Image (tube, helix red, strand yellow):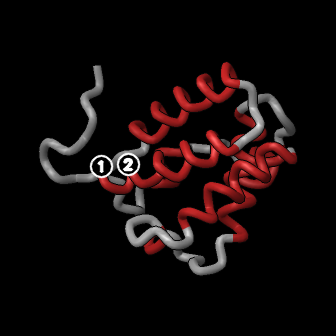
Amino acid sequence: MAFFERLVDHFYDGVEDDAVLAPLYPEAPDFTGARRRLTLFLAQYWGGPTTYNEERGHPMLRARHMPFPVGPAQRDRWMVHMTAALEASDAPAAIKDEMLAYFVRAADHLRNDPRPGTLPMVP
C-alpha cells in the first residue's frame, strides 16, 4: 500500500495546481477523498486488498467519470502527472513500463468528450 500511497500523493501534488484537471474535482482543493479512492483502486487492480470493492462496489471507471468532461486535454494532463509520479517512484523499470501501458489504456478509455471526432476509435 505504501507504494501506491506515494504514487498517488505525487500524482495529486501535480493535479492540485493543474488549471485543466483541478476544476474537475468537486472536493477541490481538498483531494483527500480522491487520493484515497485512487490509492485503493490501484492497489486492488494490481493485486492488493479488495478494500475499493468493499467500500465502493465495482470500479465502473467509465460510468464514474461520465459526469466530468474528459477530453483530449484532460487525458493528456492526467498522463503528464501520472507519468511523472511513476517516473519518481522506486518501482523497477519493467513494472513502470507495465503500469504506464495500463495508464495509457485507462486514460484513453475514460475519455467522454461528446464533440464529434474527439472520442478515441474503438475497434
Name the disc covering residue 76, or none. 2
Nearer to us of marks 2 and 1 is 2
114 and 92: which is toward the camera: 92
Secondary structure under tag 1 reads helix
Residue on which disc 1 sits: 72
Q: Position of residue 18 (x, y in %)?
A: 46, 68
Q: Position of residue 25 (x, y in %)?
A: 52, 70
**Image point (47%, 54%), residue name:** 65
Tag 2 near tag 1, CB within 8 Å: yes
Q: Is residue 24 above or below residue 5?
A: below
Q: Amino acid at mark 2?
A: Asp
**Image point (72%, 42%), residue name:** 89
Q: Is residue 85 above or below residue 98?
A: below
Q: Position of residue 52 (x, y in %)?
A: 76, 48
In the picture, the quarter occupied by the C terminus is top left
**Image point (56%, 71%), residue name:** 16
63 and 30: which is toward the camera: 30
**Image point (62%, 55%), residue name:** 11
